[in-house]
């Protein structure tokens, strides 16, 4: 194998191990053994576990950021639902490593890893703007999108802790949460009301947002006693 | 001064400095100078900057957790609004230190600091359950409360970055966001619908939740063209 090929193979092996268990618990010996090479040879390609972890995280970050990309066609709700499904696929595949990274800690919290996590958040933010077809977002829209992204992260972390709620339910819920947070902001701000109206104008009558509105109206109606 | 008194004074001085600038930028020399004592005397009370930082963070965590405590009387919306005001007072007072802590990093990310942050989140979670008068929460309610707490944190962090939206607006918005996230969950779950109904049953006709509902209904109505 050439140098770059070997490095890429090692990154793949390491990412697999760092995903399945907390990175603190994965040793260079294990990575070497899983890759079928000697420990000194691992050090030939990567100066230490941290640099290998950062390379694996770089690959995972690129993968995760790409999951927010979606052709800008069709109703917003259906697009966001596809994004959420791909996001939960990722979380499902990388559970323990994702949880360890997001909770921080000795092996995973460094300025490099923080920058990678922030890079994914920023990519997700820009994709959301592109879904909404907005280039110069008002401060309130930026807040709604960025805080929703953190809601997505924390929902995934809580889901991973016991998986007590079916993930398909949470994927739909997070799409609804986005609309709900935007609507709360729009209820008090004219500019946000216009963003919301534009964003939802292509929603079909039987789409996820319409279903939510029907159910919320039923919920708000006093029960027949 | 006695040993404990001197330690408490040093913690107070350090907390003040760690709040106003990123903890990375605060030196022991500065803390000694602000406390009016020599550098070796600081080391007599605390073995190093990290232990002093952790002691300051412990005090700040106790303070922050206490701000979620509120007599369990009166409408929920008004109670949560008072909690949000006290929370933003805290964020306002400790801005740079709060931001550095929540973003992680070399001086602030350790298992001790993570445990303190988690302790505050847990205290806030338990207070929310007590406001809702629920002892044994279903998984969906736990998710709504915990993910809302992360929304509160991220909203505060985004606010600190430029303060482009008045904080009073965000305090109300976060109370509304809690109701909105609970309503989205309740729209698809009978048990959550009951929690929501019980939680909102004491809301006055002119409270924040009623105002929100009126505005959302207006927003959902097609504009007169």
Image (cartoon, coloured by chain):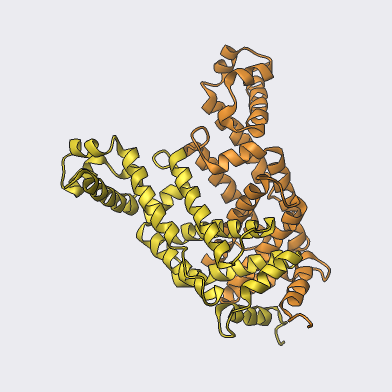
Chain colours: A orange, B yellow
Residue displayed at 58% across by 49% down = A121
Q: Position of residue B156 (x, y in %)?
A: 47, 60
| Relative vertical location of residue B211 with respect to residue B160 in this rendering, above or below | below
Is A146 or A107 nearer to us in this picture? A107
Is A196 or A180 nearer to us in this picture? A180
Judge left or right: residue B174 versus residue B85.
right
Task: Answer with the quarter of the image where residue A211 lies.
Answer: bottom right
| Relative vertical location of residue B95 with respect to residue B30 in this rendering, above or below | below
Residue A116 visible in the snapshot: yes
Residue at the right extreme, as displayed: A206
Task: Answer with the quarter of the image where residue A130 lies.
Answer: bottom right
Task: Answer with the quarter of the image where residue A175 lies.
Answer: bottom right
Residue at the front extreme, as displayed: B135
Q: Position of residue B210 (x, y in %)?
A: 61, 81
Is A72 or A149 nearer to us in this picture? A149
| Relative vertical location of residue B57 with respect to residue B208 in this rendering, above or below | above
Residue A70 visible in the snapshot: no
Q: Position of residue B15 (x, y in %)?
A: 31, 51
Q: Position of residue B29 (x, y in %)?
A: 22, 41
Judge left or right: residue A118 versus residue A214.
left
């Amino acid at each position: 194998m050439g140098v770059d090929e070997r490095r890429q193979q090692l990154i793949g092996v390491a990412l697999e191990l760092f995903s399945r268990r907390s990175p603190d618990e994965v040793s260079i010996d294990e990575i070497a053994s899983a890759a079928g090479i000697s420990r000194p040879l691992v050090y030939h390609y990567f100066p230490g576990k941290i640099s290998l972890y950062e390379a694996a995280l770089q690959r995972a970050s690129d993968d995760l950021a790409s999951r927010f990309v979606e052709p800008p066609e069709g109703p917003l709700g259906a697009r966001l639902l596809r994004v959420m499904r791909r996001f939960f696929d990722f979380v499902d595949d990388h559970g323990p490593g994702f949880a360890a990274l997001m909770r921080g800690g000795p092996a995973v919290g460094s300025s490099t890893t923080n920058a990678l996590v922030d890079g994914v958040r920023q990519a997700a933010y820009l994709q959301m703007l592109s879904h909404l077809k907005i280039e110069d977002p008002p401060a309130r829209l930026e807040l709604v999108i960025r805080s929703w992204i953190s809601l997505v992260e924390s929902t995934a972390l809580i889901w991973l802790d016991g998986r007590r709620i079916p993930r398909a339910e949470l994927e739909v819920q997070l799409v609804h949460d986005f609309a709900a947070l935007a609507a709360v902001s729009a209820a008090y701000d004219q500019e946000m009301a216009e963003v919301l109206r534009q964003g939802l104008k292509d929603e079909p009558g039987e789409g996820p947002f319409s279903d939510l509105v029907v159910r919320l109206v039923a919920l708000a109606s006093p029960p027949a006693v």
